[in-house]
Structure formats: C-alpha cells, structure tokens
Image (spheres, helix red, strand yellow):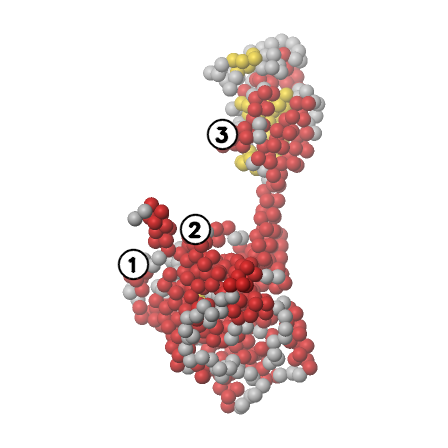
Amino acid sequence: MSSVAVRAWSRVRPLLPARADLMAARRDPKRDLLAGLTVAIVALPLALGFGVSSGLGAEAGLATAVVAGALAAVFGGSNLQVSGPTGAMTVVLVPIVAQHGPGGVLTVGLIAGVMLIGLALARAGRYMQYVPAPVVEGFTLGIAGVIGLQQVPNALGVPKPDGDQVLVVSWRAVASFAEAPNWTAVALAAAVAAVMLLGARWRPAIPFSILAVIGATVVAQVFRLDSARPIGDLPAGLPAPSLSFLDPGALGSLLAPAVAVAALAALESLLSASVADGMTVGQKHDPDRELFGQGLANIAAPLFGGVPATGAIARTAVNVRTGAGSRLASLVHAAVLAVIVFAAAPLVSRIPLAALAGVLIATAIRMVEVGSLRAMARATRSDAIVLVLTAAATLALDLVYAVLIGLAVAGALALRAIAKQARLHQVPIAADVSGDHSAEEHALLAEHIVAYRIDGPLFFAAAHRFLLELAEVADVRVVILRMSRVSTIDATGALVLKDAVTKLHRRGITVLASGVRPGQRQVLDSVGALELLRHEGRDFATTPEAIAAARAHLHGAGLLSVPEQSSVPVQPSVPVQKNAMTSQEEPAR
C-alpha cells in the first residue's frame, strides 16, 4: 500500500464504526428497544410536521427520519444522538424551495453531505467548543420563534401565502384568516398544543404528542370536519433511490445555500451531541465522527426524496431520558418509522395539518428555557447583547448569517474587554534604586528617570491607546519600560511600541526596557522594535539593571556630578561595548 493510501486510511479509519459500538449495543438491548420505540412515537408527528413545513410534503419528512436516522445512528459520533428533519433546518429550506423548487432542496442536501464529510476529514469538529453560550441560546430562541411563526397558516386553517420571510408570511396568513375565519383549525391546533404542554408537566414520560395527534385525527374523522385539512395521500413505502432531481446547470447557484445547510447541520448536530453528553455520565461524543455520520446521512436522504437532516435536540433528549445506552435505540427509532411508512401510510395521511401545527408550536415553546435565558441576560451586558442580537437576526435573516453575526459581535465585545485590561502605569523607581546612593542622587534619579509598567495584552485592539499614553511622557531624560507583565504581544503592538520609542528618541529621551519575555522577543525582533531598544541602550532582564544603565547615562550627560559604583551589577558576565548614544561603557548583549 502506498504512503498516500496509508495516510488517507489513517484519516478515514477513526471515523468508521468500531467494535466498541457493537459491544455497547449488546449490554442492555431491552432498554434500548424501549427507548427507540418511545422516540419513534415522539418523532412521527415531528417528522410529518417538518416535512410539510419544508414544502416537500410529509413523505419527505418520514423518508429523512428513516434513512438519515439509521445512517447517522451507525456512523455518527454519539451513542445517543437521534437524527432527522428539524425545525432549524426547515427554516433554511423554505426559501430554497421557493427559489429552486424541490429538486433544489435535494441537490443542496447532497452537496451539504459532501461538505460535512470534508469537514470531518479536516478534523473541524473540535471548533464547536469555541461557540459562545449566548450565541447558542440566542440561536435556539430565534429558531423557536421561527418554528412557531411557520405554523401560523396551518394553525389558522388558511393556505400558505407566498413569500419566504416568515414574518411576512405569518402576517399575510393572519390577514387571510381575518377575512374568512377557520375556528376548527384554531381549536385543533390549540388543543394539541395544550395537551402536549400540560401533559409534559403532569407525566413527562408519556408521549402526549402522539396521543394528541391521534385524538385530533379521530375527532376530525368522526365529526367530518371538512375545514380540518388532512396531510393528504402518502406513498406506501420509500421511493427507489434516484438522482433524477439533479440539475447540473443549477449547481453554481446552489453552492451558497449548500454551505448554509452544511454549517447548520454541523452546528446543530454537535450542539445536540454535547447536550446528550451533559445529560449522562460517562458518555462523550466524537465531533469529527459525528460530522462524518451526518455527511453520509445527508448524501443518502435526498436519494430517497428526503430533506437535509441534522441531530435533533428534542428527540435526543427523549432518547436519553427514556434510558438509551447505545446506538441501538436510534436504529430502532428509524426501523419503527419505516414500518409506519410501509404499513400505516393511509392512516397517517388523515392527520389534520392543524394538529401537526399544534405539535410544532408546543415544541417551539418547550425549546425556550426561560431560566437559562434569564441567567444569560443577567450575566453581563455583553452576553445579553449577543443573545438578543443573535435571536433577532435568526428571525429576520438566514440562520447561518445569524450565527456568524453573533460570533462576530461576541468576538468584538470580547476583544474590547481584553483590550481594556491593557494598562500603562507610572511606577516609582525608589524601590529599585540601591540604598548606596545619596539622598541628592536619589532625587536626581527620580527627577530624570520615569518607569512605566505595561500590564496585560499589547495587541491591535489596545496598542494605539497605549501609544497615545506613552507619547505624552513628561520631559525626562530616560524612560524605562517594565514589560514583565505583558501577557501577549502581536505585530501591531510591536509596531506601536517601536513607533513610541522612535518618537521619544526624537525628543532626546533614552528608552530602556526590562523583563521582556523570551516568547515575545521574536515578535519585537520581526518589526525591528527590539533592535531599536538595543540601539537606544539595551533591554535588561530586571528593572534594577535598567536603572543602573540609566544612571550611567545620566552621569555621562553631566546630570550626576559624582560617579558612583552602582551596587547592582549590569550583566557582568557579558562583554562590554561602547554605546553610541551615551559614549559610556556598558554591557553588550
């Protein structure tokens, strides 16, 4: 085997199923079977509802739940993750359906799947940990709002108005309802949502969503409520795999939507897997393998008429709460849904759309964790700003843009907070001057030497403020920069420091530095700042050594009348050279 093939296999092998997965599935299969059945019951109305909301129909939601749910369970990076169509993904798909039609959505899912596999091979999963909590909370809040608004037409029993902006569509639906009210649809949606919300408080373990949907369907059939529009005919089984939906001419225009879908699938899947880890003890997902599994799922789902899929937080939480311990539970969930597709399609087709709208409205409400939002908003003003801005952008813009905006604002506010930590303090030199000097010399040293301590990071966000402060140094002969407390320095900070030293030099002020850390010398050297300090005098290991060199400079300038030997040695182990500026002998570095 060639070295290229060996390297390729070394990247792919960790992403494939392992023997440990099979061993975990054999530990307690009964518990996993029960958990998988429970999740399937919860997932059925959600899959139908999200399929309808996406614009491709209930059958697309079921196909996604079956195909993507099975593949992601086998190849994903979490033992407890349940994948399928989600509300967040539906939000992204609606404008794609409006602009490119069903074929465009399927093509986007296929391209996004390839991108996810590329991210997995590039080991990009680890970067999920850098997404700030306020961005995640704002994103979740915005998604909940969008999911709820998407259900307004079906909940009111009116045809979905034209448009891809959820706020505009919802307003038009309300206007249509005002012209011809459909109180039957409103009652069914409200009843299903109420049963789910109240039932979850009373008996969380009971799947009230499926019970409410069954009840609403029975009522609509018994009382022949014609105004309660049903889902419509569903195919009895999955369609044969096909690539007929591909349009090579439209691939270029679909790349941007595919990037958005891939980004959302990665973000939501890794977030959901992290939530599952937090709800259990001893479980830890593999983020890169999770991206790989979601990539395969999104490549396969469109072949069977499914929409792009991702890890589903709500269904994953149900899976964990009902005792799942391995991937077997997720596989059972997909298998049960497949049986429903093949055996109960005629019954499922009679479910009223208003009932599914009630399920999704209740799901959106339950997504909002009021306590978590309140705590995040009270943490800091910056966290509150990021949360609100991300949520508002999610409602008004594309979800991926909302996350990018949230990340950008969070990063800018974090840089601002870090930049404020940079300080330039004038510090007395008395503590660093040896007691061998006379009182008069102490006074002269204090009069002609000023020491500044730089605290914190010296980087682009704080460097220019630092330059302004340092350039306003009073009329002295020597400035000592104490740099032992500089936590980090970048090229901008080094250039600004060089500029400040140059300006002080033009005013006839000698600049010495002390305590420069070894890790910061490369940055200073790269822009010539360290060389300039060496030309001015030298950079010293300690402040007393810098003061000794400053005293020698003042003696050479005739400001100290009596030369005295400093008690602080100035780099005695280093050879002596002449300093061009002071004409005094001093150590060379």
Name the amino acid, label 1: Arg
* Residue under the image location 66 percent in, 17 percent down: 444
* Residue 19 marker: 1
Question: Taking the image as drawn, is residue 269 in sight?
Answer: no
Residue contact at pointers 1 and 2, CB within 8 angstroms? no
Left or right placement of residue 552 versus residue 284 in this view: right
Q: Is residue 62 above or below residue 431?
A: below
Tell me which corner region of the image, top left, top right, bottom left or bottom right, holds residue 323.
Answer: bottom left
- Left or right relative to 61: residue 533: right
Label 1 or label 2, whichever lies nearer to me, is 2
- Which mark sits nearer the N-terminus, 2 or 3? 2
Give neighbour class at mark 1: few <14, some 14-19, many 20+ (Cα, 10 Å): few
Dividing the picture into quarters, in which one does residue 63 lie?
bottom left
**Please, what secondary structure does the residue beneath circle 2 have?**
loop
Residue 556 vertical position relative to residue 466 in the rendered view, above or below: above
Location of residue 7 in the rendering, given as x and y in whole percent from the top left corner: 36, 47
What is the count of numbered marks? 3
Please give left or right for residue 552 compared with residue 218 in the image: right
In the rendered structure, find residue 123 and report the number of the disc placed on it.
2
Q: Secondary structure at mark 3?
A: helix
Q: Amino acid at mark 3?
A: Pro
From this view, report whether residue 167 is shown above or below residue 515.
Answer: below
List x then y, in percent, for residue 64. 45, 70
